[in-house]
Image: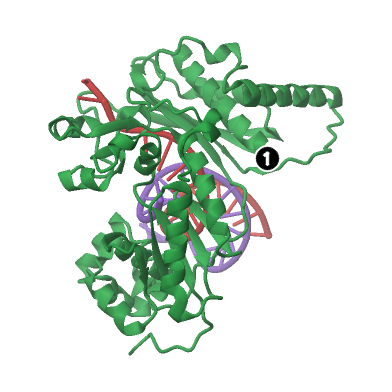
Chain colours: A green, B red, C purple
Amino acid sequence: MSYTNYSRKKNTIALIDCNSFYVSCERLFNPKIINKPVVVLSNNDGCVISRSTEAKQIGIKMGEPYFKVKNLVKKNKVYIFSSNYALYGDISRRVMKILKEFSDKMEVYSIDEAFLSLSFIEDQRLEEYGKEIRERILKWTSIPTSIGIANTKTLSKVANYIAKKNKAGVKVLDNDKDTDEELKKFHISNVWGVGKQLSKLYIKNNVDTAYKLKNISNTWVKKSTNVLGAKTVMELRGISCVNLETLETKRKSCCVSRSFGKKIESLDKLKESITTHCLSAAEKIRGDDQVTKSITVFIRTSPFDRHKEYYSNSKTIDLPIATNNSIELINAATEALKTIYKYGYFYQKSGIILSQLTEAKKEEFNLLAPLLETKSKVLMKAIDQTNIKYGRNSISIAQAGTNNSWKMRREHFSKIDTASFNNLPMLKI
DNA sequence: TCTGGGGTCCTAGGACCC
DNA sequence: TCTGGGGTCCTAGGACCC
C-alpha cells in the first residue's frame, strides 16, 4: 500500500538551521578563526557542544568531554571557546528578526532554528525563495544557514539534514519519488523524534532507514511505541501531525542548575549555590510575569566517579501561595536542601526547578498581608532594574556568598561584551 | 584532575474514591 | 486458603529535543 497519494491541503514548511551556530557566532568577532578548526565548550568547559566543519573532520565528536579530546585539540591547533550565551542570544534574535520578514507564520524552535510556513509560495519557486532567505541571513549577519523545505516538520528536518551536506545549502523535498529515494538513504537514528531507545527498538525489528519506518504498519507502531512514534510515521508519509506553533508561549517550568568548578562537601557551600540559582530563576520568571507554586531542589555527586558511592536526591516543596519572590523561594529551597543533604559526600552539581508556573495576577489582593506583599514586590522590581542597569548580580543577597570557590570554569571565554554589541564590526557594508 | 543546561511530553503506577 | 473492580488524579521518571 502506498501512503503518498492522499490528496491534501498544501502545507509547506521550511526549517532554517544555523550552521555550527556557536562557532559561527565566535567567528563574527574573530576573523582569524575562519576556515580553522574551532569548538565551543559547554558550561564549566565540560563538553564539546559546537564544532566547525574542520573540527568535525578531525574527528571531534558532539558532546564529547573536553579532556578526552585535549590531545586531538593540541595536535591540530584547534581553537577553543567557553560558551558565551549572552552573545549567542543576541545574534539569534537578529537572525530571527530577519527570518520573520519572509513569512508571517514562524516558530522559533531553538536558539539556532526556526520553522517558517511557506505555503503561500508556488512549488517551483521554493528553492529560489530558500536561497534568498539564506543569502539575506548571510549578508546581514554573516551567519551561514541550511534550509530544508517539505510538507511536514519531520520531512523538513530530513531535507535540512541533506541541505547541510550540499553546497547550495537548500534542499526541497516536494515530490514523492525523490523523497522516497532520500528516505531510503536516511538512517533511522537521524529521524527527528527517534532517539537512542527507539533506534534500538526499530533496528531490532529490521527498520533501519526512514523509508522502512514510513512504510511500517500502523498497528505495529502504536503497539510498540507511543503516540509520538505514530506521529513521526505519519509525518514521514507527508501527513502533517505536528503543528507550527506560531504563538510565543510562556514556559511551564524553569530550571537553573550548575556543575561546580570544584566539588564541594559542606552544606553552607551548597546553600550558597542553591541561593544563587533561586535568585536567577526568580528573576527569570518575574521577567515573564509568572509565579510558581512549587520548587524542587536537587543535589548529586558525580555519576562518573566509579571509586565513590553515588548519591543523588531531590525534594519538592509546594508553596502555600504562588510566588516569584526571591526571598520566599530561597527560604523554601533552603528548607528542602536540609532534608536531602548528607554529610560525607563530594557534590558535583546542584539545581532548582520551579514548576506549575502561572501568570502573575497584577492586582491580586492578599487580605492577610497587603502591605508586606506590596513592599516585597517593590523590592524585587528594584533589584531587577538595578541588575539590568548595572549588570548581573549588582544586587544580590548575602547568602549567595561572594567568594564562590565552586563557580564554574570558563578558561577560554571570548569576553565579547554584548553591551557594546552595536559597536562591533558585524555588518559588512 | 577534567563528562552541560534547559526544556516538553508521555506513561506507568500509586493513591484514593465509590 | 486465596485478595473486587473500575474510575480519576497525580507524580516520578523516562525519552526526546536542541
Q: Is residue A227 left or right of residue A367?
A: left
Nearer to me, A324 or A139? A139
Q: Quadrant of residue A365?
A: top right
Residue drawn at point x = 50 percent, y = 80 percent: A122
Rendered position, A210 above or below A339? below
* Residue A77 shows in the view: yes
Q: Amino acid at mark 1?
A: Gln
Residue wearing tag 1: A290
Q: Which element type, helix, strand or loop, lies under badge 1?
A: strand
Give x and y (percent) for residue A241: 49, 71
Q: Is residue A38 left or right of residue A97?
A: left
Number of numbered discs: 1
Q: Chain of mark 1?
A: A
Rendered position, A211 above or below A188? below
Q: Quadrant of residue A104?
A: bottom right
* Residue A216 shows in the view: no
Question: Where is the N terminus of chain A found, in terms of image quarters?
Answer: bottom left
Give x and y (percent) for residue A416: 44, 28
Q: Is residue A186 left or right of residue A257?
A: left
Nearer to me, A159 or A141? A141
Give x and y (percent) for residue A92: 49, 46
Nearer to me, A127 or A92? A127
Residue drawn at point x = 58 percent, y = 25 percent: A279
Residue drawn at point x = 60 percent, y = 17 percent: A394
- Residue lying at the far front of the rendered structure: A429
Give x and y (percent) for residue A294: 61, 36
Q: Residues within 10 Å of mark 1 (few under 14, many from 20)?
A: many
